[in-house]
Amino acid sequence: MVAEGLKKRFGDFEALVGVDFVVPEGALVALLGPNGAGKTTTIRILTTLLRADAGRATVSGFDVATQPQLVRAAIGLTGQYAAVDEDLTGRENLVLVGRLCRMSKRAAQERAAVLLEVFQLVDAADRRLRTYSGGMRRRLDLAGSLMFAPEVLFLDEPTTGLDPRSRLDLWDVIVELKDAGTTIVLTTQYLEEADQLADTISVIDEGRIIAEGTADELKDRIGGDVLDLRVHDRAQLDLAVTTLTREFGASESDVTVDRDLGTVVVPIAQGSDSLVTAIRMLDGAGIGIDDLSLRRPSLDDVFLHLTGHAAETRVGAKKRRARIPAGGG
Amino acid sequence: MTTLAPERVGTPARRAALPPARVIADIALLAQRNLIKSVRMPMYIVFSTIQPFMQLVLFVFVFGSIADIGPGMSYRNYVVPAVLVQTMTFAGMGSGVGIARDLDTGMIDRFRSLPIARSAFLVGRTSSDSLRLGVQATLLVVAAMLMGFRFGNGALPAFGMFVIVVMFGLALTTFSAWMGLTVRDPETVQAAMFIPVIPLVFTSSAFAPISRLPGWMQPFAEWSPVTAAIDSARGLALGDEVLYQVNQVHLHTALWHFLLWWVVIVVVFTALAVRRYRLGS
């Protein structure tokens, strides 16, 4: 899948300023960005639902503008909102999609039965969707995109609005699909999701791709590790920032300060002894520490570093902390 | 978890091909989906059938008791074809609401991302709606006959009236589909469609002969597609002579007007609706 210079404007709003990215066959690429960054617009163009104003894209070797019918025959799409029919049963929904994709009635029924089992919907298979939970609808929607085992699967924020349990279940399915060789384009505003699932991540913001690479490569952009500090007394926050930037030679612009939480995040080049150095410096300056840790940068840090603003939604980002008991001041 | 291995079903090229048989099959599948949905909303069917019954009672018995449209014809016989056409008009408007709901729930995006004919969604919708209209028209004709309405022109023309009435509803369905795709919000679609449709229905020969309407209204009424449909239905149900006697128009003129209007409405709004559907949002 290749996208080159995709542009789209809605009235005065430039949704896409120029989106380029490549998804190798069998890879899982995450398009990561906050709300309104252009993720859904990109997906809609790639799945032929929307025409780009400029640029070109091919999916599975077919041009989205000139061969849309072939593109549709090669892809599966699971949108941001589960596109399933409320008045039909789970099974009927799947069979309908299968038959619209040229499967015989029998083949569609057989495939639907397999997918209902895979997605743990067997008990609810013959109930109307009105009775389904949000997580069940998403699973059914995803099952619908898999009726004919598409060559490229587009997942537009597949886990938005799901409870943590359903999210993890869906991740398992996505990993399994990827392992089975399906090329997957996944959009997400959850940094953790991209980190966990994707081979490579394209960070999108304000209608353009601003960074690309594996999660580790993106983290390396920050260079080294990150020092995470929460001060005891917020009044000492500025003093802490000055002390740490001076000691570690970081520029003010690289430092992230959250005044409400009383936290400072400082990128540092050196290794583990910097933790000791930091404690000594802070203690020497008479700054009380609530929490201090040294860790690999998270994608949160990367996003902040790249865009100057935080990704809007964060869900329980797992931080691999090298935590030490905070010394009192 | 069992395997999700990509056991591919056919090639993209094979799935993408659209021979006529395939297009028809897709239309049938989508029409079937709409019908299943209708059948599963029994209250909707009950209410949407009771409403025209009440109109029939209102016009036949209440207005029928004071209206006098001249010798040789009861107001009951005059007004039944009009109530039929009016019912089809309002019922046809339901299409747009259904389509707006499909937009709202993402079903249209789902269908647009599948390798099916671009026209299948809309044609499927109008097909299933025509069937729904046919059922409703049948029920209404039976009710009218129980209230004393009589066909005076033989069985074949009576069937012709039935066809005209459903055809008119189908034309409204295409207009309604375009409105649904344009306005996009189910509630707004319903309200928006009343604006052009209500005056069109009442500014016609529906409830009073055109000669009795105020002078300024008469030219509108004479050229109205609703007049053409109702007079065609009347002529077929009651005979050309009766039609001419009350409305000073011959059946062949009314039919000719009707067919012209029908083609224009169906072609224009189908084209507009398909264009909307293709473009997406």
Image (cartoon, coloured by chain):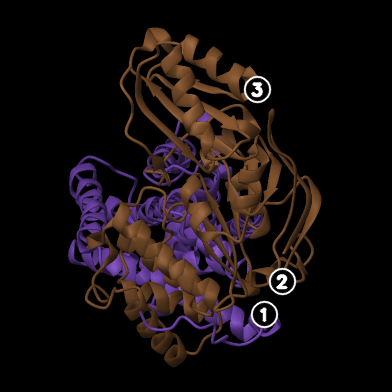
Chain colours: A brown, B purple
Pointer 2 local density, CA inside 10 Å: few below 14, some 14–19, many at least 20:
some
Neighbours of disc 3 within 10 Å: few (<14), some (14-19), many (20+): few
Can I make out residue A10 in this image? yes
User: Same subunit under labels 1 and 2?
Assistant: no
Identify the chain of the residue marked 1, using the numbered disc in the image: B
Percent position of residue B215, x then y? 51, 29
Q: Nearer the viewer, mark 1 or mark 3?
A: 3
Q: Judge by depth and name the residue closer to the eye, A210 or B207.
A: A210
Residue where numbered disc 2 is placed:
A60
Q: Residues within 10 Å of mark 1 (few under 14, many from 20)?
A: many
Q: Chain of mark 2?
A: A
Residue type at mark 3 is Gly
- Dot 1: what SS? helix
Image location of residue A266, percent across then percent down = 55, 27
The x and y percentages for residue B143 are 22, 64
Which residue is more in the foreground, A246 or B211?
A246
Under circle 2, the secondary element is loop
Name the residue carrying label 1. B12
Q: Find out whether the residues at labels 1 and 3 contact each other: C-beta distance under 8 Å.
A: no
Judging depth in this view, the residue of A33 and B212 nearest the camera is: A33
Quadrant of image for the N terminus of chain B: bottom left
Q: Nearer the viewer, mark 3 or mark 2?
A: 3
Spatial distance from mark 1 to mark 3, Cα to Cα? 57 Å
Q: Nearer the viewer, residue A85 or A165?
A: A165
What residue type is disc 1 on?
Pro
Quarter of the image holding residue B73? bottom left
- In the picture, measured across the screen, residue A70 lies left or right of residue A145, that is right
Q: Residue at x 67, y 80 (%)?
A: B12
| Mark 3 to mark 2 CA distance (whole Å) | 48 Å
Specify the amino acid type for callout 2: Ser
Chain under numbered label 3: A
* Disc 3: which residue: A249
